[in-house]
Amino acid sequence: MKRNRLNLIIGLLLILVFGMWLFVFQVRESETALVTTFGKPTRTITNAGPYLKWPWPIQRVHTFDQRIQNFEDVLDEAQTADNKILLSMVYVGWKITDAKAFFPKFSSGSVTEPERFSIATAQSKLKDLLRGAKTAVISKHPFADIISADPGQFKFEAVEAEMLAYIQARIETNNYGIEIKYLGIEKLGLPESTTEKVLEQMTAERAVLVSEINSRGAKEAASIRAQASSDSAKIVNDADAQAKVIQSEGLKLAADQFKVFEQNPELAIFFLRLDALKQSLASHTTLIFSGQTEPFSLLQGLTNAPAKK
Amino acid sequence: MSDDPTHHDHDHGPAPEAPAPEDAGTRALSEALRSSFFIVKVVMVILVAVFLCSGFFEVGPQQRKIILRFGRPVGVSKEALLGPGLHWAFPRPIDEVRTIPFTEIQTVTSTVGWYFTTPEMEATKTELPPGNSLNPAVDGYTLTSDGNIIHARAVLSYRIEDPIRYEFDFANASNSVRNALDNAVVFASARFKVDDILRRDPLGFKDAVRAKMNELAQKEGLGIVIEQCDVRAIPPRKVSPAFELVNTAAATAESQRLQALSEQNILTNTAYAEANSRTNSAEAERERLVKSVKADADRFTALLPRYQLDPGFFRTMLINQTVSQIMTNVQDKWYLPVNPNGDPWELRLQLGRPPVAARTIPQTGPVGPSIDQ
């Protein structure tokens, strides 16, 4: 009996495993699943977890990557509203939002790997849509809307938004079961023949710029020097004026003392003369005086004696 | 009774009837089956052990892993991340272990605006000669707001802020980050003039790229935090010499300006020094004048009474005292005695000559001594 029980358990386990293999499938976190019944889409699953199904050939489960797919298109030429040729390349982030709508539209052509094939087919369709969007949107804008230093004129992001709206509208109209999460311009360019002219123009502009810089440099230096001379002269002149004010204050203060001298102007003048004499003969002076000069008149008799010989 | 040939009868109650006699072939078959079942049991045990042990996995030091149980992450947000060490999960199909990119810093490079090169060419520092034009399918470049062309390359270093979102929201997240970086470079280039990018405001251009990249990371929900964004911009190689001339001219102009500023500083400082000197002199003069006049007044006040006693004597005394002082200080003194003829002396002064020595010129008449100055 014990042996029979063990065999029974093993048998049940095998049946359970086989049953799970036939009737259970799981959807991962990053996936969405579509269950088809006799080839017809009947159920969409977007949440991760284990689910039941009827075994093949009744039902079949198709799982798709639900993450945001990255797609870059190619450089395409488009004419701007002011008749300039602009090359552009954009990228989009897109994801499958409705596998039931997505699968029938993009799966045809592959029996073995319809899921992977459908992604490639969808991106091929996106490429066509993007080309149409770029041509339509760029043709409505002048070149300066996309390339401009003027913030008022610059509409780079608006152009991107218009392209996104253009594609979204067509996706919704055709019910592709996908959503464009974002779109951005990845590259802008000019036709090769135009780049040659642009490079020549850049060289010519640099030559003019060199001349301007040289001239401006010399002019600025001269201006600084002139300003410096003017400023320094002003500083000295201001100081002179201030010095005169200070000297005037000194004279005013001195004049207050002059009242003392009014007691005897004769004596005051005598003192002034004496001071002037001392100051003028203070040093490096050669003095010639006659015998009549006091106190040298004392020498008068002595010096005349030899002359009498 | 069991039909198992490996069954031992001693486990069961009373002794059965005597077994039928077995021939040698039956015994051999019984032995073979017993051995086979034993081997099968051992193999099954080993298989079960292998099955369970296959659930062990290791997480490296620069890795994080996450367990998906029936497709759902086990745990929420960062709690779901398994750090370095040994872990165990149910084997497939119950559990599935996924590796999450978790190195500290991720890096992407935008070369959409760079000229054609390869890693090998960069390593050997070689490059193709520049052509007269740029083929947009081969040579990357960006357009500037004044319609010119530059080459720009950006290297973005970032941290993954939300690894689960980074892994499960994007099929190829690093490509999405690179696309956003390309867009940021093209966007910033289209707003800046070529001379601003290359010469006047390269930091402004770099900041604009970083700001746009930040904005896109938020808008597109990339789940990253930007650590560093290095941007290098150069002119097209064909016109590079022309830009070098501009740089040289700008450097020269700047040098001239700095030289002028230096001279301005010197001039201004000299002027301020001179101004200070003049005002200080004026103040000193004022001080001296006031003190001098006060001293004169004091002297006057002190001597006035004596002067008033005998003005003549006072004057003579002071004159003599003064002459005495003068004579002490005077360098050369010439005494001219009274001409015996009574005529005045005729003096001749030679000015501008060093006063080496005084010479006496022979008198031809009433001529006094000559004085060299």
Image (cartoon, rainbow, N blue to C red):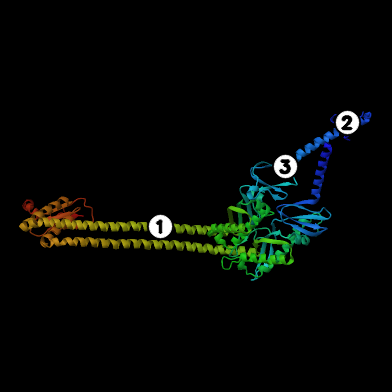
| Residue B115 in view of the camera | no
> Dot 2 corresponds to which residue?
B31
Q: Position of residue B55 (x, y in %)?
A: 72, 42
Q: Quadrant of the C terminus of chain B?
A: bottom left
Query: Could you say which is closer to the camera, residue A142 or residue B76?
Result: B76
Q: Are marks 1 and 2 in contact (CB under 8 Å)?
A: no
Dot 2: chain letter:
B
Residue found farthest to the front: B14
> Dot 1 corresponds to which residue?
B263
> Dot 3 corresponds to which residue?
B55
| Closer mark to the observer between disc 1 and disc 2 | 2
| Closer mark to the observer between disc 1 and disc 3 | 3
Query: Quick check: B148 left or right of A271?
Result: right
Residue type, numbered disc 2? Glu
Q: Position of residue B95 (x, y in %)?
A: 72, 46
Residue type, numbered disc 1? Glu
| Residue A85 in view of the camera | yes
Q: Secondary structure at mark 3?
A: loop
Residue at horizontal 61%, vertical 47%? B104
Badge 1: how crowded within 10 Å, few (<14), some, or many (20+)?
Answer: some
Query: Quick check: B314 left or right of A53?
Result: left
Real-space Cα separation, disc 1 to disc 2, in angstroms: 115 Å
Q: Position of residue A97 (x, y in %)?
A: 71, 60
Q: Position of residue A254 (x, y in %)?
A: 19, 60
**Pointer 1 and pointer 2 on the same chain:** yes
Tell me where residue B146 sits by quadrant: bottom right
Query: Could you say which is closer to the camera, residue A261 or residue A124?
Result: A124
Dot 3: chain letter:
B
Q: Secondary structure at mark 2?
A: helix
